[in-house]
Amino acid sequence: MNGHTSNNLDVYNTRGPWQEMDLAFLGGEPVVPPGRITPWPAPKKEHLDALREVVDSGRYHRVNHPIVADLEQNLATWTGKWKVRAVGSGTAAIHIELDYVKDRGESVVTAALNWPGAVGPIAISGLRPVFVDVDLNLAGIDQEAAADRFGPGVAATLITHLFGNNILVPHARSAARAQGVAVIDDVCQSIGAIKAIVDGAYIDTDALALSGNGAKHLGAGELGFVITEDPNLIKHVDRVSLTSSSRNGERTFSPYSEGYNYRPNVFSSSIAKMRVIDLETQLQIRRNNGKLLWEMIRDLSGIFPLFDPFDCNQSMLNFPLRIEPEALGFRPGPAARDTVVKLLQAEGVPVLVWLTKPVFEYLPTIANDWRASDFPNTVKLLDTMFYVSEIAPPNEAEVMELYAEAFHRVWKALSKFGPKISDIATTI
Ligand SMILES: *Cc1c(COP(=O)(O)O)cnc(C)c1O
């Protein structure tokens, strides 16, 4: 209890303006009833058929299992261009790709707004990460800042696409090409980026890394994919990821004994194979839900999407938003976002804060080599962003309407009481 307690409680006890807000955080009914949302990966009975197919096959592992081969082929066909190899995880895919290009230099240029697990493989490959800020309008690598860092000694640039946004950055790609810097795209959250998304063309890259884990579009358990046109990288997958069995079933040991046993899980592959069939529909429903939700909340003050929900090529995994604290009467910093998230969560809306620190602060061996203040856009986003999850099928328009209603309820309270709302909340 803090200093304003008695004052605020007086207000609360004399049926005052607080109750009229009906905020769930202050004891009202949540807008989204418990159990109304289906959380991803949205389990279905058919998934049991996929698992049974593996059991019936009598083989629970092997990279050359026909289910794995079919999945690779079906996903390759879906992309319309690339070759695909299934591996153990998205992280494994990033490691294999970096391992393949590691002799080109000593460092990898990547964004400070990043997933710690994606940056880990840089060090595992014996390379050093070099961080640059993000473009505020993209929540992806600032292409001019990246290009400034390219030069001899840079092995690769790792371009991370977050939340389903497409990080096209054509200038960074051509600058990398000109300097012999490998281009690797982490599209773990953005499966649509493996299709032709640049005015009908594909992004210019050496390799894409995709995750099939349970939280991502393929929602398949533990799974990842190396995606490329380079036949030697495809061969390299086996060298890094298998210790004792080759794709043709021979028992061969990796010549470097570098095999990490990054084999794809066959059960996960079977689920993923089933999901590829409906992938286009899934993406369309996610996009429609994102657009619909944005249309219903866009008039609220001080709220912005991290990328354009109307871009028909994005593959929104979760709907990322940021708020401008000043527009809600808050000082700069995370307090406004944290308040909004708390109030929306109480209403039953599945909103989450992603990360709160630049990626290097999560990596103890390099944390002291970098300063957050050198990455102002990254810090600004980390202080102000959150995302709405559960925009995937079977959740449809009615669920989005509930989310939007909760946003309106929260904004109404915020516009009336501003930052005071969190004081009230802590006293009750
Ligand atoms: C999920 C994710 C990864 C890692 O994928 P896993 O399959 O969980 O190893 C890497 N990068 C990003 C951006 C991710 O979201």
Image (tube, rainbow, N blue to C red):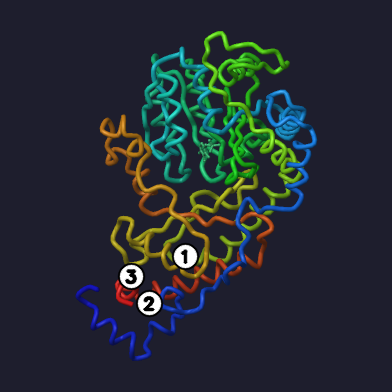
Which secondary structure, mark 1?
helix
Q: Residue 290: where, in percent of width, then height? A: 60, 56
Q: Are marks 1 and 2 in contact (CB under 8 Å)?
A: no
Any mark on residue 309, and which? none
Disc 2 and disc 3: Cα gap in Å? 13 Å
Q: Residue 9: where, in percent of width, then height? A: 29, 83
> Relative to 294, is 144 above or below?
above
State the residue in front, 152 or 200: 152
> Relative to 195, is 250 above or below?
above
**Residue identified by numbered label 3:** 422
**Residue identified by numbered label 2:** 416
Q: Is residue 14 left or right of residue 275?
A: left
* Label 2 vs label 3, nearer the camera: 3
The quadrant holding residue 303 is bottom left
State the residue in front, 28 or 200: 28
> Relative to 164, is 205 above or below?
above
**First along the sequence among labels 1 and 2:** 1
Residues packed near mark 3 inside 10 Å, few (<14), some (14 to 19) or many (20 plus): some
Which secondary structure, mark 3?
helix
Residues packed near mark 2 inside 10 Å, few (<14), some (14 to 19) or many (20 plus): some
Q: Is residue 53 left or right of residue 427?
A: right
**First along the sequence among labels 3 and 1:** 1
**First along the sequence among labels 2 and 3:** 2
* Label 1 vs label 2, nearer the camera: 1
Judged from this view, the residue extending furthest toward the top is 255
Q: Is residue 225 left or right of residue 153?
A: right
Q: Amino acid at mark 1?
A: Gln
